[in-house]
Image: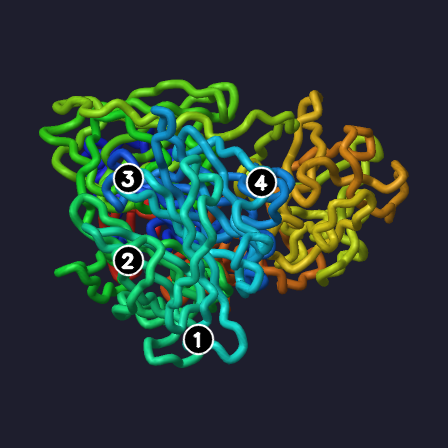
Amino acid sequence: MKSALFALFITLFSAVVSAADSSAFNGIRTARNYKDIKNHNPISTLKYSADPGVMVYDGRVYVYATNDGYVGQLGSNPESNGYGQINTINVMSSSDLVDWIDHGSIPAAGRNGAAKWANNSWAPCAAHKKINGKEKFFLYFANSGNGIGVLTSDSPTGPFVDPLGGPIVSRSTPTCNSITWLFDPAVLVDDDGTGYLYFGGGVPTGQSSNPKTVRAVKLGNDMISLAGTPQTIDAPWVFEDSGINKSGNTYFYSYCTNWDNGPYGNARIAYMTSSSPLGPFKYQGTLFNNPGDFFQTVGNNHHTIIEFKNKWYIFYHAEWLNKQEFGSPKGYRTSHVDELPFSNGRFGNAKGTYTGVTQLSKVNAYNVNYASMIAWQGGCAINGLGHTTVSYNKGDWTGVSNVDFGDGATSIKMSVASSNGAAIRITSGSENGDVIGYVTVPATGGNQSFKTVTADVKVSGTKHIFFVASGDVTVDTWQFVGSGSSTDEPIEFGDGELPTNAPASAKLENGWYLIKNPSSGKYLQVANDQAKAVSNIEIGSLSGKDGQKWLLTNVNDGYVTLTSGLGDFMLDIANGEDTNGANIQIYNSHGGDAQQFMILKTGRDGVYTIGTKASFLDKAVDIEGARTADGTNVCQWTNNGATNQVWSFEKIGGSNDNNGNDSSCWSEALGYKCCSTCLHSIFTDDDGEWAIENDDWCGIKPSCSSNTRKCFSEPEYPCCSSGATVVYTDESGKWGVENDQWCGIN
């Protein structure tokens, strides 16, 4: 019976399915999406972006945010966010408040930052002003709790430079020495072009109701100097988080209340009004509760209020996403936006929602659109600053909300780059939705060698569209061709990065590797194969044990992490020290600077040095004393490309315990738990076997493979790949057809 049905089915099936187009995606599991397609909050799930400072300029909203880290790249159980490592500022922009262009991360502080005198860049805010006939942009930030810095640029996305070489506000500034926390700036450019800066916070002992720790000051015409003495704002029960707005002739100062159980609630956003930008201000009420009231993740509260296209909005952060990723809040925050009621000169109370705001306009499919304009995504990485591109690995995807195709599009043009070639599947509705078309990406000569490719599509009306990659590919722009026409030239954001003499990096594919020093023939390994934090790193002869296996994961700005095959430990510079001889070890995965490295080209094919982010790439992974004996220690040393500092990466299949111990969970490095029991495999990819448990993917431990059938049809018939069409059902189960034979569908 199956044979007869099979012959009939093949006749019908071949008429409607293009196997050549879809075959590149057989067995590919799309990357995890933390945000449901019906939701717009958080505004981005690619990065943890906190303390949103928001600027409206030329019909777009720009969000500048504290960079708490990259989603999916901090390990499965990172340490709580200590904030001391933060020295970059994430920047995004949107004209519709749903599709956000990720412009990258601004190097603001630290050795590689514009303001090298500052250790940190927290809680940014921004303003623009025309000076001498030219639009200038000003980015203010907090150096921890010890001063306010300012950077300037000719573009909202940079490059930003430090015009002062020090803080604009410090503890030597009049009236500021006694401020508990000299941080959290807010800025206003008044109707007459005069700038004002607001800052401060903290609660002196015994002064909960009237801390008197926030200040307001007039800025000079250049926006980088003070034109007066900072004035105290007597904000009741203040804690932190200054905000400033103007409507009509009224100035609105807003702030976060403290945690001392005052009458206005703990860590809520309150506001005051005045007829003068410097006060005195009168308390009016609260306008936004703590995010914990909406998302069940109580934490600090930081906001910005804007008026945009005749509506008021409040931007704020919450810890909802890091709870989804780690199981409990750890201080990594994401930016959200919701409408803020405003009537008769007073703010109402906004509500934090997952749904977010209504999209203000559709995306014209026939414009040249940046790939980094994203409403939803799974996986992916952003390259560059200002004008950015998107790198996809296998199964990674991005989605764009409400793309208007009018009467219909017939083709698409994409600017793409790929070392090995790939395919891009374009769908509507979701990343696994109806297929609009397939784009073939040839090998272009590298991930920065862009080529324009075209493909046929068929789509009309207004759709959410999604781009899914079958392999490593970088995308710059996309543009559909058909019934409509371009209405806007693409915004030229320019290159926001300053020129640098940094060595050229190489991008390797995510995956498992053995790391070999060609000169000695020895491999990077964990001493004694010991799965324990602070275990030492040394070299040794090839053993194939898990202590020699490293999971390379591309993170941000060209950096990678190297996770040990022994478990949830990463290669780590001890104490994050920037010194010659600093020891190299494994440590609990957290993905911070001490655990980020850059694979640097040497001029020899396939041979690299491994620069350390902790040293700002000045130093590299080094075999101590250039010795070659097994057990020789590995440390950090000035990168001179010597033979004891070069490494080759040998691709392998993954981590297995040769002793039969199945305790290490290979899927945790990919952001998924291992299955608690030996479940039936749904499909297999290059990483391993996958199943579903508690409505989420889980990795099947290698020891299960000998005990578990992948599906009911084995061994007589193979299992279908994920997404196969059901063509026949009998008492055994559901059947599909692949490669001209029956297969069982789980």
Quadrant location, the C terminus: bottom left
Could you tell me which secondary element the residue under label 2 belongs to?
Answer: strand
Precedes in sequence: disc 3 or disc 4: 4
Q: Residue 61, relative to residue 182: is it above or below?
A: above
User: Residue 445's x, y, as percent?
Assistant: 51, 19
Identified at 50% across, 26% down, the residue is 447
The amino acid on which the numbered mark 1 sits, given as a three-letter code, is Trp
User: Residue 721's x, y, as percent?
Assistant: 37, 46
Q: Disc 4 designates what residue? A: 115
Residues tagged 3 and 4 counted as in contact (Cβ below 8 A):
no
Precedes in sequence: disc 2 or disc 1: 2
The amino acid on which the numbered mark 2 sits, given as a three-letter code, is Phe
Q: Is residue 100 visible?
A: no
Q: CA distance from mark 1 to mark 4?
A: 32 Å
Precedes in sequence: disc 1 or disc 4: 4
Precedes in sequence: disc 3 or disc 2: 3
